[in-house]
Amino acid sequence: MNEQADGERRLTTRQAAEALGVKPATVYAYVSRGQLTSRRDAVGRGSSFDAREVEALARRNRREAAGPAAASGELSVRTSLTLIEDDRYYFRGVDAVELASRHRYEEVAEWLWTGKPAPGARFTAPPEALAAARRSVAALPEHSGPVDRLRVAVAAAAVADPLRFDLSETAVLGSARCLIPTLVGALPEVGPAQWGGDTRLARRLWSRLTPQEPDPDALAVLDLALALLADHDLAASTLAVRVAASARAHPYAAVSAGLGALEGPLHGAAGRLAHTMLVEVLERGGAAPVVAEYLRAGRRVPGLGHRLYRGQDPRAEALFARLEQLPQASRALGAARDVAEVMARHGGGLYPNVDLAVAVLTVSYAMPAEAGETVFAVSRTAGWIAHALEEYQERPLRMRPSGHYTGPRPPRPLP
């Protein structure tokens, strides 16, 4: 530490890193995000930092690591990826719906990862990783679900990547660009695999979801769904990813943590439930008796409402607008509207969410009920990687809340 003429205390990069409990490279990441200011030494030997500014940032980091935020009682995690505000959501400050409407999924993923445009981005699975993932998935029982297959594929791809423990940004991005197409390629094909030169991830995924041949408009809707679902702030699975990344788990392990949380019926199963409901509405010729049975059984009607939006989910709004242009989606779209209208007449006050919109697509093109889960998991892998990249720049193990013990007070006699 050195003292300036005006009494200002300055820290070297090494001293600032020690005070913050991070690597020197992370100190410069704080500078790039505007959380610290640096000054070049007069002799040009390096940068120095205002000690008071470093101490204030260290205090903020300690408060985050301590657990619940005092004001809201909820865990607060600093992120520059997704903002949800006034019934809209934004990826790195850009309207996410507009971004997803104009760019393919791969380009949206690159924007989340790097904050830079990537026109024409393509993802390619390494042959060795893809072969290992396919062998592992093929060994599973026939009744295995899509998330089962994806979890096994991630583990196989990890073992095939000798650089998985390299947590530098370059290495993690390289792994991400290989992992997502490996996940898709490991899923069993149920439809025509002839892509006709179309190498988009959405085209490769389509042949894993339905035996029907895709038309360009239907493929565009699937690609839009993938792009819209890529991230959505700190959902349960995303928080699990950040906890794993905080412990410096490699990106494959972090994605595995997200897939584990996705297995919960309150997070990943919503698309399956909405699909099943729409099929029943179509079979029975109307939504009223189906909705009545849900309410009578005390069950929530799937595909409606979202805790982060007062009005309609903007992701659903964008998908419904595209689905209206597909003649094959008209029956399922009508069923979804019927459900929303029945609920509105009874004062439900709930708007359709993205799960209902994706269900319209999966029902319309003879996809299985679990197809929505597959789309969600593949898409959200991009967001999970983006959050892992952010977390690798933070102080390790900062997500260590203290337990609030409610058991009997010691000492107690041995049982």
Image: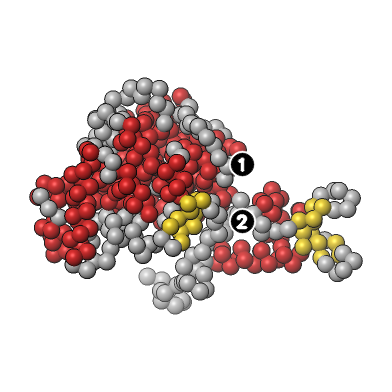
Q: Residue 172's quadrant in the figure? A: top right
Q: Amino acid at mark 1?
A: Ser
Residue 179 rendering spot, x and y as whole percentages: 46, 35
Q: CA distance from mark 2 to mark 1?
A: 15 Å
Say which mark, if any, is on residue 168: 1
Residue that appears at 27% across and 44% down: 324
Left or right: 4 as drawn, with respect to 76: right
Near-viewer residue (317 or 76): 317
List the single residue furthest toward the front: 325
Q: Tell me the quarter of the image containing the C terminus.
A: bottom left
Label 2 sits on what residue type? Arg
Quadrant of the frame with the N terminus = bottom right
In the displayed structure image, the side of residue 314 where residue 292 appears, left or right = left
Q: Where is residue 103? Give x, y as percent.
A: 46, 39
Image vertical order of residue 321 relative to residue 154, above or below: below
From where the camera sits, is residue 244 visible?
no
- SS label for mark 2: loop
Q: Is residue 53 left or right of residue 138?
A: right
Q: Neighbour class for label 2 at 10 Å: few (<14), some, many (≥20)?
A: many
Q: Secondary structure at mark 1?
A: loop
**Residue, x 47% and y 45% (percent of image)?**
99
What residue would you read off at disc 2?
395
Seen at 28% across and 41% down, the residue is 325
Question: Which of 12/4 is in front?
Answer: 4
Nearest the camera: 249 or 81? 81
> Is residue 405 depicted above or below 61 in this figure?
below
Q: Which sits earlier in the primary sequence, circle 2 or circle 1?
A: 1
* Residue plotted at (38% across, 34% down): 202
Point out residue 352 in the picture as x, y percentages from the top left corner: 28, 56
Q: Is residue 43 above or below residue 10?
A: above
Q: Position of residue 386 (x, y in %)?
A: 52, 47
